[in-house]
Image (cartoon, rainbow, N blue to C red):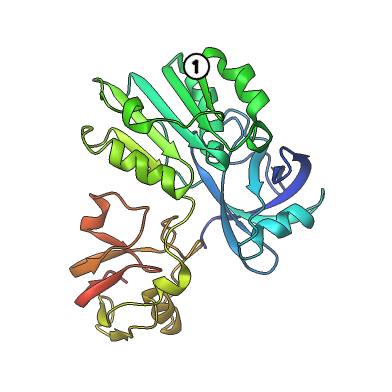
Amino acid sequence: MKLLMAVEVVARRQVTAAVVQITLRPARRAAFPPFRGGAHTILVLPDGKRRLYSLVSDPDRPELWQIAVLREAAGQGGSAWLHDEAAIGTRLLASHPQQGFGLAPEARRHILVAGGIGITPFLSMLPELRRSKADYELNFCARSAADAPFLPELQARCGDRLRIWIDERLDLPSLLAQPAPGTHAYCCGPARMLRGFVEGTAHWPEGTTHVEHFAGIPRAEAQQGEAFEVEIASSGAILPIPADRSLLEVLRAAGHGVDAACEYGACGSCVVEVESGQPIHRDVCLSPAARERKMTTCVSRGSGRLRLAL
């Protein structure tokens, strides 16, 4: 992975029973690189696992970064390690900011929809909204007040712009029924909420809706599909991709050092340029425009033969 930085854990705070906030500072530099609200970093854990975490701190505070980690009982161990082992003084590696989700600068009004830990990318957007005096509303859904990360801070920071949905279910079709000119809508949360958001904004103008995914397709599913071939543009080599292996696996085995982090199609770290051929896109991170010339290698596949700019 390119552009990794050494970071040190300098503070921890238990936000809810299942969410811990971890504060990082750069170990070998005075400040972190700049980022905009909604960005994430990729942490490299001691066992080599790479995990994505939204930056929840103020972009105008480059001396410290903060992330919030939900303990995932069915996860692969990364969240448990950060909860149980990442003590003050622990050193890790972190990527430079990855900016796949953020506020549209042309928007006159912003509708934010968050579910549970999906609040995290919005936390770093709020300072931007406050400084720009932008018009916005934040809809925050959770199973209970105890399960709603950062709820007291949000109430203090957002005032009447915050709408909390705990005792009643958020009616996305009603909220998103009328796409007013200049309004953009954003969503991050569980899969069911994201599906409802996408369906509820199907009639919105192109480019006015924005979704952040924390998960893509399961890794076992990512390794399944029709066999296809890729041609490496720099060498002309033809690589067969069997039905039971991912393109990422085959490229790495052939000596191509393709970066990857999530390996389920959500982060975009493993994207490559496609010079010709028809990819079968299965990611949740690329825009329709990007899919015209790029593909993720961890989950997406191809029809026949693709030519890759490698």
Q: Amino acid at mark 1?
A: Arg
The residue shown at (75%, 55%) is 91
Check the image and report above or below for 228 versus 150: below
Q: Quadrant of residue 46?
A: bottom right
Occupied quadrant, residue 279? bottom left
Q: Is residue 116 above or below residue 223?
A: above
Q: Is residue 212 shown to the viewer in this render?
A: no
Q: Is residue 307 left or right of residue 60?
A: left
Q: Position of residue 35 (x, y in %)?
A: 51, 37
Q: Quadrant of residue 19?
A: top right
Seen from the viewer's position, the closer of residues 173 and 228 is: 173
Binning the other alpha carbons within 10 Å of mark 1 as few (below 14), some (14 to 19) or many (20 upward) gives: some
- Residue 253, image x, y percentages: 44, 84
Q: Is residue 107 visible?
A: yes
Closer to the camera in the image, 20 or 276: 20
What residue do we see at 30% from left, 36% from top? 200
Instruction: Give the x, y percent position of residue 285.
Output: 37, 52
**x 37%, y 32%: residue:** 172
Farthest residue to the front: give it.
Answer: 168
Residue of label 1: 161
Q: Is residue 240 left or right of residue 166?
A: left
The mark total stands at 1
